[in-house]
Amino acid sequence: MKTIPKRQEIDNQYKWAVNDLYSSDEKWELDYEKALRLAEEPCIYKDRMSESEEIFYSALRESEDTDFLIENVYVYAFMKYYEDTTNPKYQEISGRAQTVMVKLSEKYSFMVPEILAMDKEIIDSFLKNPKISHYRHMLMDILAKKEHSLSQKEEALLAKAGNMSDVAKDVFSKFNNSDVKFGVIKDEQGREVELSHGNYAVFMESNDRQVRKDAFEALYRQYEKYANTLAAAYYGNVKQAMFFAEARNFGSTLEMYLSGSFIPVDVYKNLIETVNKNLGFMHEYVSLRKKELGVEKLHFYDIYAPMVKDVKMEIPYENAKEIVLDALKPFGADYVNQVRKGYESGWVDVYENTGKRNGAFSWGAYGTHPYIFLNYTGTLNDVFTLIHETGHAMHTWYSNNNQDYTYAGYRIFVAEVASTCNEAVLIKYMLDRCTDSRERKYLINHYLEQFKGTLFRQTMFAEFEMETHRLAEEGRILNAELLNDVYRKLNEKYFGADMVIDEKIALEWSRIPHFYTPFYVYQYATGFSAAIAIAARIINKDEETLAGYKKFLAGGSSLHPIELLKLCGIDMSKPQVIQDALDIFAQLVRSWE
């Protein structure tokens, strides 16, 4: 039986260089102890920020230096934890890191209320000081949120409550990454294989329908067993969101989460409305899939199977790296050379191991290079995941190398643009070089999957979140029955009459980690749409767009997301960008034959 390797069995060249953050756990402990001491010492600037320019600046600088310290402490601890979530040592240090981070947040929670309580004339006079004027954009963002900020005492209380706000997320994470086991199924060769988060996607792309069905049923069998527990975790996370939204005088949780990036609620609703108006395109795709697979009834375990049979692209990681580097050439030699350097110097954690967190992401701390976390299995999807996360990493690299710590971190609204733009150039690259008609259809199938999975699926997720948060805000209890019902109806609407709505698909909400970061997933869809437009212009050698895109990557949070995208000629306040992407999807479906 093929089993998942242990962490120590994987060659070090395929592991990320966490020691670039801290050379040892002992070095980490020194910074952790420093952070802990800082957390236990009162801030000497409390109740004094309006006294003088020097005190005002010193308070801002001390808070920022502390943020830099705790970011390194926190990122290292959780990177080690994600390597093997069953390791008790890193369970413990990640918990300590989270606790001290909350304490430090509490320590400096006085700052925003004090800034908001200051007379505008005083702040204006302070901003004439060159050292303070650097913080102008940040301070203006704070002042813009005055109506949602509370007194110092209330802010301190909310900071303490923050220690409990991640409980539901932590419960889900430990269940999903450590506790749940899916048992054994037989692969295409009849061999017994342990089913995991990592290889589930591989089985869903199998040409053997029985393998797909067995994997689907085995996976959801476990989520069904724990549906009530998982519903309680999801509801708990919605309730903590409602608590903070109400405490901060927001009209809804949706409004609160979007306000952090200065995104109008209409942008979110425009996405859902525009996609809903174009669901006929999705239904056409489902009908095409049913026809191409030659099945009497199309089930959800058929939705990822390649529509072109007998074409299986197995791409070893070393090959994938070279494909990615070649595909990225439209972005310029400077971009490509930096990616190559990153791949060769410990940016990437490549393969799955027992206990490793599932999925993929890019992360890091300012002052150190970015990191890429994968569970690479050799599929075409994995190549796209590699270039996707490389986009995130390069966005971070450009921001960190062009902005100081204050403005290096970019908002989540623009976070998916660089990653998806990379995917768009990859599909164009592969289609341009494909000479086999069946392989070409296979790649077009993959492109359709990107639209389906990113634009349609993530919008459906976004609609699920909007609906369930709305129900909770109206006083409904989000139990498993209600959540299943909402999710089932959305699947019926999005996939149409030619799709069999399998009973177990109603449970899919229970396995989506992103739902524990409320109102995040819609940005995959908006980012995808923006990226399609940007990539098309860059591929067509539009030098102005390329120059604007590099400025966008380097912008960090020095501008609001909507303004950053305008550097690339993209206006997300209007639905046209979404509609243009949907029209491309429709063209692909209708030109399939």
Image: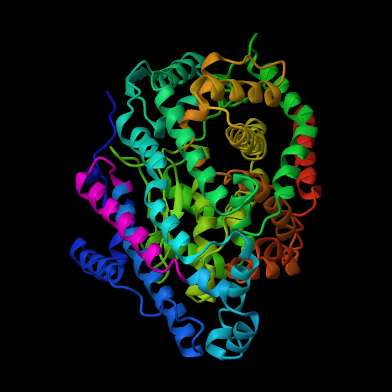
> Chief secondary structure of the magenta span?
helix
Q: Position of residue 147 (x, y in %)?
A: 63, 61
Q: Position of residue 307 (x, y in %)?
A: 63, 25
Q: Nearer the viewer, residue 437 or 164?
A: 164
Tell whether 585 sits left or right of 346: right
Q: Quadrant of residue 499?
A: top right
Tell me the residue at 76%/44% (across/down): 270
Tell me the residue at 26%/69% (across/down): 31
Q: Quadrant of residue 567?
A: bottom right
Q: Position of residue 501 (x, y in %)?
A: 61, 16
User: Furthest-top residue in view?
Assistant: 296
Q: Is residue 582 above or below residue 577?
A: above
Tell whether 119 sits left or right of 533: left
Question: Can the viewer see residue 333 in this picture?
Answer: yes
Q: Position of residue 296 (x, y in %)?
A: 65, 8
Residue 275 located within the stretch drawn in magenta: no
Q: Nearer the viewer, residue 137 or 197?
A: 137
Q: Nearer the viewer, residue 165 or 15?
A: 165
Tell whether 125 sits left or right of 107: right
Q: Is residue 192 above or below residue 13?
A: above
Question: Can the viewer see residue 517 in this picture?
Answer: no
Quadrant of the rendering where the N terminus is positioned: top left
Tell me the residue at 77%/58% (across/down): 571
Q: How many marks?
A: 0
Q: Quadrant of residue 565?
A: bottom right
Quadrant of the rendering where the C terminus is positioned: top right
User: Furthest-left residue in view?
Assistant: 26
Residue 104 located within the stretch drawn in magenta: yes
**Which segment is the magenta one?**
82-110
Tell whether 478 sits left or right of 156: right
